[in-house]
Image: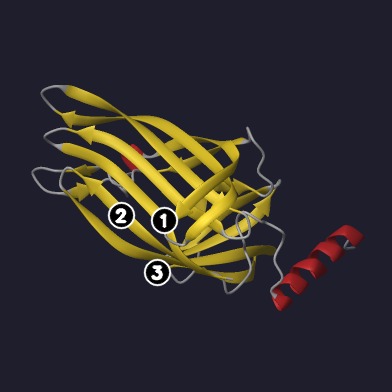
């Protein structure tokens, strides 16, 4: 017989899916219909590029008895998020060539629901801009050999941050770093790359700025910097 707790959980999940209500996650809004537009700028020794990157919140979905909150980016990738032990966690994704969402091998904590100074977590990641320069250009974004884990931590909870969309107060800052080794030059051996990753979130808005630094400049492999800043948002 189904217990009262399970019945209430199931009823709550169905209600959420039906009406589109979202849990209170002030630094990472999950409500359906929100839209964020960012300017994405990347630079490395091979050049630089600026483009627009957009994210839309698509609301709740039911899958395998759990409630997920979907986000889609302008490349068509769909992220499946849920709340686990007080954290917003990405559990699956679906690209434009996939019919069903693909479960992450390891669930990725995006942010605590109620972040406090000193909160820390681990976040699986991959290089954003690190790439091979010769004999052909190739990004390491999808190379399994250079996956790493960022040691993330809330380092500020009352920052004032200015981006193209405006000036935002009482922002939190999350910083993380990781050390990876790459064979950048066969003659000189491997090189260490210290990955630096920083995110800023504004209450009621969400992510307003992201910065990733991957410093490396050799004849064969180069790194660089990626910055993403909020241009506009719709509630």
Q: Position of residue 39 (x, y in %)?
A: 36, 60
The total of numbered circles placed on residues is 3
22 sits to left or right of 161: right
132 sits to left or right of 60: left
Give the label on residue 229, or none. 1
Is residue 225 in sight in this rendering? yes
Q: Position of residue 50 (x, y in %)?
A: 27, 59
**Number of residues whose C-alpha sits closer than 10 Å to that of mark 3, classed few (under 14), some (14–19) or many (20 or more):** few
Quadrant of residue 17 within the rendered picture: bottom right
Q: In the image shown, does 165 or 196 lie closer to the viewer?
A: 165
Work out whether 8 lies above or below 131: below
Give the label on residue 154, or none. none
* Residue pictured at 34% horizontal, 65% vertical: 52
The quarter of the picture where the C terminus appears is bottom right
Q: Earlier in the sequence, mark 1 or mark 2?
A: 2
Q: Residue under circle 3?
A: 74
Secondary element at image label 1:
strand
Q: Position of residue 20 (x, y in %)?
A: 69, 74
Give the label on residue 41, or none. 2
Task: Report, in whole angstroms, how far the alpha carbon at label 3 lies from the one at label 1.
Answer: 15 Å
Secondary element at image label 3:
loop
């Amino acid at each position: 017989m189904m217990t009262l707790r399970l019945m209430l959980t199931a009823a709550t999940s169905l209600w959420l899916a039906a009406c589109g209500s979202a849990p209170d996650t002030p630094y990472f809004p999950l409500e359906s219909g929100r839209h964020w537009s960012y300017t994405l700028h990347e630079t490395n020794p091979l050049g630089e590029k600026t483009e627009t990157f957009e994210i839309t919140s698509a609301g709740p979905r039911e899958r395998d008895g759990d409630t997920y909150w979907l986000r889609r980016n302008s490349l068509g990738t769909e992220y499946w998020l849920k709340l686990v032990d007080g954290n917003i966690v990405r559990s699956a994704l679906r690209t434009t060539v996939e019919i069903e969402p693909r479960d992450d091998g390891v669930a990725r904590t995006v942010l605590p629901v109620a972040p406090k100074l000193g909160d820390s977590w681990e976040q699986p990641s991959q290089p954003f801009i690190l790439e091979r320069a010769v004999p052909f250009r190739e990004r390491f974004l999808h190379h399994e050999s250079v996956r790493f884990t960022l040691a993330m931590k809330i380092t500020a909870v009352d920052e004032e941050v200015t981006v193209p969309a405006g000036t935002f107060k009482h922002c939190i800052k999350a910083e993380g770093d990781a050390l990876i080794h790459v064979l950048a030059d066969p003659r000189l051996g491997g090189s260490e790359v210290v990955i630096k990753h920083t995110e800023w979130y504004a209450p009621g808005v969400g992510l307003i700025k992201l910065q990733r630094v991957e410093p490396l400049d050799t004849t064969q492999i180069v790194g660089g910097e990626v910055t993403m800043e909020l241009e506009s948002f719709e509630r």
